Image: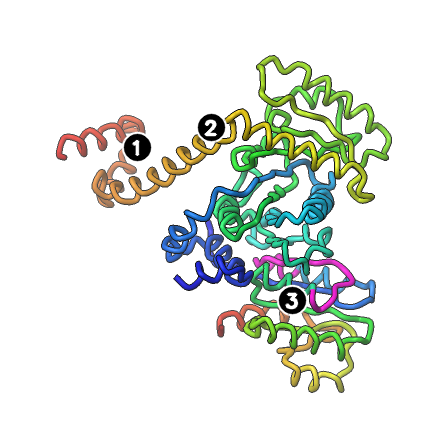
Amino acid sequence: MSETRIRVLIAKPGLDGHDRGAKVVARALRDAGMEVIYTGLHQTPEQIVETAIQEDVDFIGLSCLSGAHMTLFPKVMKLLRERDASDIIVTGGGIIPEDDVPALKEAGISIVFGPGTPLEEIIDFHRKAVRKQ
Amino acid sequence: MDIVDRILKGDKRAVARLITMIENDDTSIREAQALLHPHTGNAHIIGITGPPGAGKSTLVDRLAKSYRKLNKKVGIIAVDPSSPFTGGAILGDRIRMSDLNTDQGVFIRSMGTRGHLGGLASATGEAVKVLDAFGMDKILVETVGAGQSEVEIASHAHTTILVEMPGLGDDIQTIKAGIMEIGDIFVVNKADRQGAERTATELMAMLELNTEPLPWAPQVLKTIASDSIGIEELRKTIESHYTLLKETGHLAIINRRRTKDEFLAILNQEVTRHLLKDIVDDSQLECLVESIMNREIDPYTAASQCMSGFLKHR
């Protein structure tokens, strides 16, 4: 019954304690047939990147509601480059102002899913992106 | 082969990639597996099983830290269930192991069961070998939250730990067949909860009924994994068990039996794959299915006729 499965790491960098959104997305991706590694709260960028490498994921979804995304997200991207793992696609979610999105994309975040994004759209993105790889 | 060199040089990305290929049943890795084989057979494999929520992941985390203090390298494979409907999974055992993520002497891999029953994934055994070749001294394999008959871990581990917690049932549960028979060490976790003493006593009473003389008398320990209480004693008990297996020659016997079982299973697969078409071709197969459906012949007789036909023409 084995076959290729999309593997996604859903991670909560930084200090905020709100993981409802992350869990909803994790569950939706699970129901779409993906294997979702969930790391829990308060992860450092180093922990996230190390986990992504050991788990050999196709995607990292970063969820941040603390406002520290402009520091934390680019740090993750930098560490991925250092570990020669830039092929992992990184997405962002949480409370992220529109104005910050261009800078995050510049830093290498593929897409930012703001509040109210339909789950179908998130699932679709993962399916299409993995096919392009 | 490139990926093997990278693994032997300590590249975690290569280890992770090979495990993915094993999980995806990618047969192009046979050469890599062959090259890794001489580097395997050195790790102590420790199985951790027990019902959901008993504290297996937390216990694995604390045990790994205990081994790290002794400078042992630790590999962890943590299995969680895949959905029988979508194949998706939430792999959440790492939540309890956050501090280990960045420890260079630790490698953790989460695995979905992908339809395999028995408490492990079908790729678990091969993934253990990769971590073994990667130089891990201790490999902790955490099963899915196990029920009464998920006992496959006992045929992979050298030391099997069954994690229980207070309040899950009376002593009738302890004399049932299945999972209660596979523990080398029984742990009553969450031992600060009411009923822990009783659970431990019931387990000990169950073990006293063992009539077969075993080289190792299974132990019952109490832990509070979240507070790191009882972990050192558990580690020492695991080590005593392993030492005993080595000294009495049982480790060699176990390893030989497993090697034989594994080889026969692989050979069996190969034989089936290569010979099935010679024994019965596609059109014959469809005819036979038709006859069996029409109750003209039963499946055992049909199989036996195919086989004797094949053997006669050889």
Determine whether B63 is above or below A76 in the image.
above
What count of labels does the image hold?
3
As drawn, is B41 to the left or to the right of B206? left
Label 3: chain letter: A
Q: What numbered label is drawn on residue B292?
A: 1
Residue A6 appears in view? no
User: Residue drawn at (65%, 78%), measured in percent from left and top?
Assistant: A109
Q: Amino acid at mark 2?
A: Ile
Q: Where residue B57 appears, x then y in whole percent? A: 70, 45
Horizontally, residue B107 falls left or right of residue A13, namely: left
- Residue A130 position within the rendered picture, expressed as x and y whole percent measured from the top left: 52, 70
**What range is drawn magenta here?**
A28-46
Kindly indicate the quadrant of the structure image that contains residue B46: top right
Q: Mark 3 or 1, which is nearer the eye? A: 3
How far apart, in angstroms, are the residues tagged by discs 2 and 3? Answer: 41 Å
* Vertical comparison of B186 with B227: above or below: above
| Residue B27 location (% of width, % of height) | 38, 54
Q: Secondary structure at mark 3?
A: helix
- Amino acid at the residue labelled 1: Ile
Q: Which residue is mark 2?
A: B253
Badge 2 crowding class, 10 Å Cα cut-off, few under 14, some 14 to 19, many 20 or more, is few
User: Would residue B271 appear left or right of B156 to someone viewing this image?
Assistant: left
Is residue B247 one of those drawn in magenta? Answer: no
Q: Residue A92 in the image: state x and y as whole percent.
A: 69, 73
Task: Residue under label 3, please give it.
Answer: A49
Q: Residue at x 49, y 53 (%)?
A: B23
Q: Point out the frontmost of discs 2 and 3.
A: 2
